[in-house]
Amino acid sequence: MPKLFELWTGKDGESHYAEREFDIPAAAASKVHSQVTPAGGALDWHDAPCDQYVITLTGTLRFTTRGGEQFVVSPGDVLLARDTSGGGHEWTLIDDQPWTRVYVELAE
């Protein structure tokens, strides 16, 4: 069953995550686009550029926060990335598939 994860910046200035009920609230999108990262890809420490849903179509990734929290995102999972400041997170593809995803950037 798909999962919904949320990343946010806590009062400590660091990124944190939680698994949520798969109930995506309606929100106005300012932009929708897609991206593909080849198998074996990774992205070092960064913050989300804006509040956005990230819908994974292919690929399995491990996300890590600077505090050491880790979670795995698989095809069908949705990430609500809201950690737009602070310590940020990194991700690494952990299977042999490219990461194909759709971004739904949320209006402020």
Image (cartoon, rainbow, N blue to C red):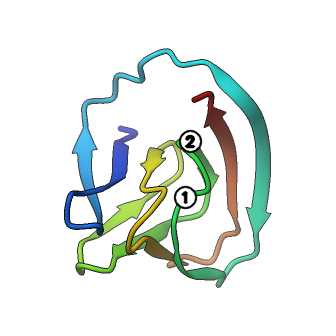
Residue 95, percent from left and from top: 54, 76
Name the residue at 35% across, 47% down: 5
Q: Quadrant of residue 106?
A: top right
Along the viewing direction, whichever of 9 and 70 lies nearer the viewer: 9
The numbered disc on residue 108 is none
Q: Is residue 31 above or below residue 66?
A: above
Check disc 2 and give the amino acid type: Gln
Q: Are marks 2 and 1 in contact (CB under 8 Å)?
A: yes
Q: Quadrant of residue 1?
A: top left
Residue 16, percent from left and from top: 26, 61
Name the residue at 78% across, 56% down: 35
Assess disc 2: are there few (<14), some (14-19) or many (≥20) residues with their C-alpha within 10 Å of its C-alpha.
many
Q: Is residue 66 above or below residue 48?
A: below
Check disc 1 and give the amino acid type: Ala
Along the viewing direction, whichever of 33 and 67 lies nearer the viewer: 67
Q: Which residue is mark 2?
A: 52
Name the residue at 24% across, 72% down: 69
SS at mark 2 in the image? strand
Q: Give left or right: position of 95 versus 105.
A: left
Name the residue at 25% across, 46% down: 19
